Structure formats: C-alpha cells, structure tokens
Amino acid sequence: MKTVLILVISATVLILAIGYYTCDHPFPGFKPVVTKVSIQSPHHDDVLYIKRKAWGLLGNSQVIVVTNSPDEQFEPDADREYVFRGLSGFFYEFEGDTLTVYVRAASGVPKDLHTEIHIKQVVLNNPDMMDMHDTYKERGLQELAW
C-alpha cells in the first residue's frame, strides 16, 4: 500500500513538472509560432509591427507586442514595446496616424518606443471582449490571427 502511494505521488509530481516546464520551455519540435502584422503610417516613414508569439506544448502561452522592430525572433521588452500577455483576443484598427488596440488588460507605456504613430489602448471587460469576437468585422476592426 505504501509503495503504491509513493508511486502515485511520484507520477503526479513528474507529470506536473513536465507540464510546467513545457509551458515556458517548449520541446525542440514545438518551436514558438510568430505572427507579424506591419502598420505603415500614411504621413510619416514610421512602421509599427504587431507581433504575437505563442509557445508551449499546446500553444497555450502567448505574448503580443507592438514595436518598431521587425525581428521575428524576440523577447518582450517593456521599455521599448507595448507588451500584452495572456490568451485574450487582440483587436485593432489603424486610422490616420492612430493605432487603436482593444485588449483585456492595458500595457504599460514604453519609455523608449519612439514613433510618430499614436497608440491608444481600449480596455474591454470580459463580456465586451466576447462580444467583440462576434462583431469586430462589422465594426471595421482587425483581429490578430494565428
């Protein structure tokens, strides 16, 4: 009986450790998936990029950045990028020189991001974000797609 209990506890600890590790450190065959959209100012030479990186055994970890770096291999830098973490939806529109992003939680404003494009964050509660999934096209918005 004692041996069975030790085996069950050991197996549980091992499974939890593997699950935790794969959320932040994907196996070599499970490389992060990066999606990138470029936003070009019609009035300036500025270009911003909205980049999403998803990783983990099931792709269940995600970060989205708004940055002026086109590099697809990146680690988020809150001093130079707007950083949005989590699996919530990300909707946006670009009009004139204003990029408006619709998110569940606002990012801090990066002190070292230099751009002529104004970035406006609209924070939505969960019911409004769920509604946005159904109505974003009608509202003229874009969704950052996988």
Image (cartoon, rainbow, N blue to C red):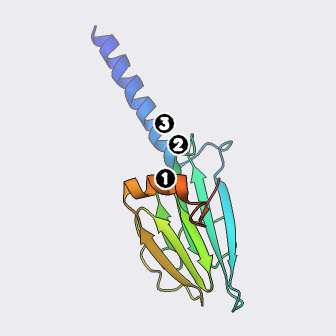
Q: Position of residue 57 (x, y in %)?
A: 57, 40
Q: Against 34, is 140 above or below? A: below
Is residue 133 positioned above or below 39 on the image? Answer: above
Residue 7 is left or right of residue 64, and the answer is: left
Residue 127 screen position, x and y as percent: 38, 53
Mark 3: secondary structure = helix
In the rendered image, the quadrant that contains the N terminus is top left
> Considering depth in this image, is 21 or 34 the residue closer to the camera?
34
- Residue 18's disc is 3
Q: Residues within 10 Å of mark 1 (few under 14, many from 20)?
A: some
Mark 1: secondary structure: loop
Image mark for residue 50: none
Q: Are marks 3 and 1 in contact (CB under 8 Å)?
A: no
Front residue of 12 and 100: 100
Residue carrying label 1: 87
Residue denoted by label 2 = 22
